[in-house]
Image (spheres, rainbow, N blue to C red):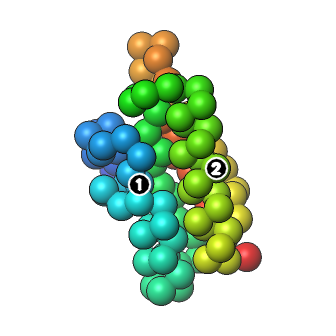
Amino acid sequence: MTRTLLLALLLAVAVPAHAGLFGKSPEQAATEAEREQLPAVTIWVDATWGFRKSGAANDLSAAHKAFYAHGYHVVGVQPYIENGDLQGFFVTYEKR
């Protein structure tokens, strides 16, 4: 479990800003989750580029909008902080 979480964190930090986990945009991730009929999905929202406060908030809003349009709702938003700096968020959505 710890090794899996560490791998997910390392992959998430390497993803460019404004992209979901593994290089997918929130819209792509939501479309794929719906197509594959996943009951839940977790994405990474990067907060390390640009304006950490407004940029991350806008990215979270865009992700929420994309997943809501595909029938998902937010069940958790977990910030990831490293050395006192906000790096991003793990956001989990569940099918309504």
The tally of labels here is: 2
- Residue at (50%, 26%) from the top-left corner? 51
Residue at image mark 2: 61
Q: Amino acid at mark 2?
A: Ser
Q: Is residue 94 visible to the viewer in this orientation of the structure?
A: no
Residue 33 higher or lower than 51, as above or below:
below
Q: Where does residue 66 sit, x and y in percent of width and height?
A: 59, 65
Question: Circle 1 — which element?
Answer: loop
Q: Amino acid at mark 1?
A: Gly
Left or right, 47 with respect to 65, comes to left
Distance Cα–Cα, label 1 vs label 2:
13 Å
Q: Is residue 90 visible to the viewer in this orientation of the structure?
A: yes
- Residue at (59%, 26%) from the top-left corner? 53
Quarter of the image where the C terminus is located: bottom right
Residue 83 higher or lower than 73, as above or below:
above
Residue 64 higher or lower than 81, as above or below:
below
Question: Circle 2 — which element?
Answer: helix
